Image (spheres, rainbow, N blue to C red):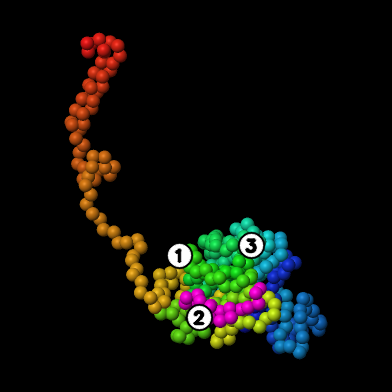
């Protein structure tokens, strides 16, 4: 279940009944005012609300907005897009789908996985979406084109959870092999591998910054201070995002820990569809930014700066650089000598040639 955090609250749920649902969450005062307006406009004083859960003792009324149908097997995960206009669902039918929140219509169907699709993560600026499957594959999709941007291989078993870092440059994944893998989205390769838990990891969450200056790295990029993981081994662990070392272990559950989330100082959850555009800048405008983490690196331009140099012309230079005219007379003399020598060799060949040489 995911909740869209705006004034007109909306909840998304995914079920094993092959469908997902979107729910409107409104204050009872707002619903009562709308009903009063409808009563004034209609002669009939009765008002019918279908698929609605209303309790006068609570300040909220929940009503079904859309019923999302299309998947051929049980659903696993659901996540809102950071722009709050779309929602993504994953399913055991090896597909993930993108839906329109306002109309409930399907916008995109992608079947790029060969195993059951489970986890889903949304990039903070909304340009990318990550999905995981039971074959150990992590796919990163470009939502602007609906095509795969890259894929990562490295997990030995099922991948259950994927989470983009708040700065948008890294992707964390975890699953049945008990390891957390950090992927560099710019270099498109594995950045770190953490032997985190002894059993299946159920969920990952980055700590979202509140926007204070102290929570920004040296190059002005917001970064999660730590990563939290939950597992079937009954523990919750926190990891530093600077060196990916364990900070602490939370113990107390007597059974499996099924999920975890982080509530920042701003009062907003780190889960869901990301935190919007980081520091007011999109991912494309931040591709050249580099956080050294306090270390000194000797960087070079790639590709290096090239300067033209004079080249020595050759007879077989295809471009004919600096070659005025071909030496036709010398070439003709060479051809004539070669032809004459060839003819003499032919006349001196065989048995008659042996008698002539004698």
For the residue carrying disc 1, how many other residues have a C-alpha within 10 Å: few (<14), some (14-19), or many (20+)? few
The tag earlier along the polypeptide, 2 or 3, is 3
Check if residue 262 falls in the magenta segment.
Answer: no
In this rendering, position of residue 170 left or right of residue 292: right
- Name which quarter of the figure residue 196 lies in: bottom right
Instruction: Pinpoint residue 346: horizontal percent, then vertical percent.
Output: 28, 17
The tag earlier along the polypeptide, 3 or 1, is 3
Front position in the image: 152 or 74: 152
Which mark identifies residue 303? none
Residue designated by label 2:
225
Check if residue 239 falls in the magenta segment.
Answer: yes
Front position in the image: 88 or 316: 316
Instruction: Pinpoint residue 154: horizontal percent, then vertical percent.
Output: 55, 62
Which mark identifies residue 134? 3
The region drawn magenta spans 232-249
| Residue drawn where x is 19% and y is 35% of the image | 327
Between circles 3 and 1, the one closer to the viewer is 3
- How far separated are the C-alphas under marks 3 and 1? 25 Å
Examine the rendered structure and indicate whether residue 210 appears above or below residue 138: below
Q: Secondary structure at mark 2?
A: loop
| Residue drawn where x is 81% and y is 84% of the image | 45
Q: Do callouts 1 and 2 mark residues in contact (Cβ within 8 Å)? A: no
| Residue drawn where x is 35% and y is 63% of the image | 302
- Name which quarter of the figure residue 296 lies in: bottom left
Front position in the image: 264 or 193: 193
Front position in the image: 76 or 14: 76
For the residue carrying disc 3, how many other residues have a C-alpha within 10 Å: few (<14), some (14-19), or many (20+)? many
Which mark identifies residue 187? 1
Instruction: Pinpoint residue 105: horizontal percent, then vertical percent.
Output: 66, 66
């Amino acid at each position: 279940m995911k909740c869209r955090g705006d004034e007109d609250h909306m909840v998304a749920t995914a079920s094993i009944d092959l469908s997902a649902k979107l729910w409107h969450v409104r204050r009872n005062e707002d619903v009562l005012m709308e009903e009063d307006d409808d009563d004034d406009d209609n002669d009939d004083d009765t008002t019918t609300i279908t698929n609605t859960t209303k309790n006068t003792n609570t300040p909220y009324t929940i009503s079904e907005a859309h019923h999302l149908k299309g998947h051929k097997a049980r659903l696993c995960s659901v996540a809102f897009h950071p722009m709050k206009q779309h929602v993504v669902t994953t399913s055991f039918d090896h597909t993930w789908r993108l839906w329109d929140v306002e109309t409930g219509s399907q916008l995109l169907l992608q079947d790029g996985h060969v195993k059951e699709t489970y986890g889903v993560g949304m990039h903070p600026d909304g340009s990318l979406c990550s999905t995981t499957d039971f074959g150990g594959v992590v796919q990163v999709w470009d939502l602007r084109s609906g095509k795969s941007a890259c894929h990562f291989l490295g997990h030995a078993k099922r991948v259950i959870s994927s989470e983009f870092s708040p700065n948008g440059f890294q992707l964390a994944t975890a699953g049945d092999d008990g390891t957390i893998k950090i992927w560099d989205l710019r270099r498109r390769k594995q950045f770190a591998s953490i032997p985190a838990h002894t059993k299946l990891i159920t969920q990952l969450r980055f700590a979202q910054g509140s926007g204070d200056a102290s929570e920004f790295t040296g190059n002005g990029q917001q970064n999660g201070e730590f990563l939290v993981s939950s597992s079937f081994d009954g523990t919750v662990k926190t990891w530093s995002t600077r060196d990916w070392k364990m900070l602490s272990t939370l113990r107390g559950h007597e059974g499996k820990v099924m999920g975890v989330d982080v509530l920042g100082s701003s009062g907003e959850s780190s889960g869901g569809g990301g935190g919007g555009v980081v520091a007011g800048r999109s991912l494309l405008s931040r591709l050249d930014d580099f956080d050294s983490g306090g270390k000194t690196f000797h960087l070079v331009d790639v590709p290096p700066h090239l300067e033209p140099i004079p080249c020595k012309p050759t007879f077989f230079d295809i471009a004919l650089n600096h070659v005025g005219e071909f030496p036709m007379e010398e070439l003709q003399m060479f051809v004539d000598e070669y032809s004459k020598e060839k003819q003499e060799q032919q006349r001196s060949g065989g048995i008659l040639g042996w008698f002539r040489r004698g």
